[in-house]
Amino acid sequence: MQQLKSDLNQVLETVKRFSIEYGVNTSDLEEELIGKNSSSIQEAALYYALNEISMDKPNWTYLAARVYIQSLYEKVAAVRGYSAETKYGDFYRLIQHLTEIGVYSRVIVETYSKPEIEELGKTINPEKDSLFNYIGIFLLADRYLAKDYEKNIYELPQERFMLIAMDLMRNESKDQRLELVKEAYWALSNLYMTVATPTLSNAGKSYGQLSSCFIDTVDDSLDGIYLNNWDIARLSKDGGGIGLYYGKVRALGSDIKKFKGNSSGVVPWIRLVNDTAVSVDQLGQRQGAIAVYLDVFHKDIMNGFLDLKTNNGDERRKAHDIFTGVTIPDLFMKKLQELDENGRSIGEWHTFCPHQVKQIMGWKDENGQALGLEDFYDETDRKWFTDKYIEAMNHPLLPRKTYRAMDIMARIMVAQLESGTPYMFYRDEVNRQNPNKHLMGIGKTSIYCSNLCTEITQNMSPTTIQNEYEDEEGNIVIVRKPGDFVVCNLSSIHLPNAVKAEVLDRLIRIQVRMLDNVIDINHLSVGQARKTNETYRAIGLGTFGWHHLLAVNGIHWESEEAVAYADKLYEDIAYHAIQSSMEMAKEKGAYARFEGSEWETGTYFNRKGYTSARWENLKEDIQQYGMRNGWLLAVAPNSSTAKIGGSTDGIDPLYAVEFAEEKKNFKFKVTAPELTHNTYPYYMKARHELNQHWSIRQNAARQRHIDQSISFNIYVRHDIKAKELLQLHIDAWKLGLKTTYYVRSTSQGEIEECEACHS
């Protein structure tokens, strides 16, 4: 009975505070609770509040959140043995206990003294829990707060944020470490930013890793294919999403050891990757997530690759559980626009086997290694790929399959409308804009594909076996020459919160340091991934809440004002990020391959048209001190972590002003963030109703300032005409987008994404 009275008083106190703060009539709820004889008063209050959430009553989500948090306080207090009235218990005892049972890594207690942990515990502010809406606190508690082996939640939200801050700052010098921890906690607890899902889940723990996605280049050999499968299985086990480039693997019907017609092509190997994705799941939570990319000039593009995820055709040549991407040169897009006098597309497109190209064309690099078409791209001043393509096309002995370019594009678009993929990767633009292309030579491809969510573009090369021998102890030793195995380390700015508070400069400075420190403390199971991570020190600082930001600023999505705002805001973000990396280089040293990069030469800034005094001064500072990170900016999808932050996904328009959020273990109503009569007009149009040309223009303005890429979805109605979808793709290419993510049609079901990139 005493517990019943306590529960009732706690909930009524929350209800009264809520009604004062938001001016919402809660008298019906109070009367309903007072009349309850049940011991589940909090459940009744939560159920009532969730049912009240609507366009007319959006703030009930905060009452639901507060009731849920109060319940969370009581559950955690009961498990940890303290009074729930204090909300948060002893922070040092929490760390001590979870370390003893093996949930937390020992490195935390070995790095921080008891007085330091107690000081940080006093910094924890329970009032920051009131910033969460219901879906935010529910997702955080359900998926990310630390549990014991009986699945009892031990952590509370602010403790998770503090553990992340402590873990990411543990290698900083002792004289500034605590202040940096507090600064990182400030950024997280105020919901000015979120870290990527692997970091949010695994920081401070004894298992898992902190990076989001990985990209590998598959070598054209049996050893390369199977060792790549081993590598991605290990990374998938630790929760990473994978991008794979298969453009170097020989096509169906090519020769093997000079025996003609023996190659089975890429499809059987991709099916093997599909089985790995299903059987080696991510930390037992979800199946692995892998995207496979192939060039549009690869002979297998029309021989099974574009049909891998469709529901028609031979099931023995399907791979429904992987995602597909097509890498596209400028020349192909130009061929789509070659028309006869009747306006019919007549551009021809030739596809080749990469192995046969290397055999017959005889192109070599300075080290005598054979080169294929995939190893060249078109620069602004010299069309390297186009020249090689024409040379290959004119060679009388080189086998090829020839199609109308439009027939290939039609197959791409049909697959996109059915399954959402393939993603589009505009390879020439990606390589032209690469600040680290100095390592490959003029006109040579450095970047072959992107990752699972299309926002990462970094230098790539295959890992190869150099030798296999028996050592003195009788062990069989395989010597592998490591390639550039891309790693992406992500976090994202909560745009509405950070812009409103005018903290971008301060926030980005600590955010870049947090991301940079992930590189040093992370545990990656694949050696070449570790090596690449340490060599380039690449990070991906991104954003979410773009539609939310437009709404609170009174800017319509379909407007020149939105395009101009994207241009200005992302230039500011780029400036602060680059400046922060320069300051880090001044303190800790530049990344290993800085010399000769476009950061050092200043070419990057010249190409972007950064000519103002602040940019010129920054360019000079970089030439003097260097850059800590080879790549800095990448805008990820941000679905689950954007919801934790209480905002809109990534750069996407809102799904609807009011909708049901549904996953395997929950379903409840959600409304647009900060929904009022003032913001409603800017949320009114659903994402599929918005003119996508405005979205493309916004993203082009944004892309100018992003050194990597952006997870950019195209939203279309199921009855869109082929010509209209084609024009969207042509516009995206013409305006300089590097990649596009899903084509999301109203006829598709919910598309499952890799949550690793939801930073």
Image: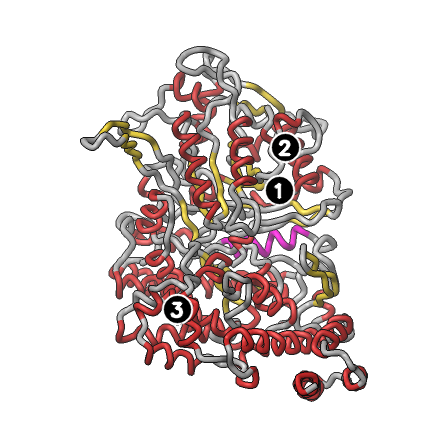
> Residue visible at 31% across and 49% down?
535
Q: Tell me the mark number nearer the camera, choosing from 3 and 1.
A: 3
Amino acid identity at mark 2 = Met
Q: Which residues are magenta?
A: 692-703
Residue 601 is tagged as: none
Q: Which residue is mark 1?
A: 729
> Would residue 422 be found to the left or right of residue 372 on screen?
right
Left or right: 508 in relation to 643? left
**Residue of label 3:** 509
The residue closer to the viewer here, 636 or 571, is 636
* Residue found farthest to the left: 472
Task: Tell me how far mark 3 sits from mark 2, CA to CA.
Answer: 43 Å
Q: Can you give x and y, in whole percent of width and height, for residue 434 in the image? A: 40, 46
Check if mark 1's residue and mark 2's residue have beta carbons within 8 Å: yes
Q: Nearer the viewer, residue 414 or 365?
A: 414
Kindly check if marks 3 and 2 are in contact, taking CB atoms under 8 A apart as contact: no
- Magenta: main secondary structure equals helix
What amino acid type is highlighted by mark number 1?
Answer: His
Vertical side of 566 occupied by 465: above or below: above
Q: Which residue is mark 2?
A: 409
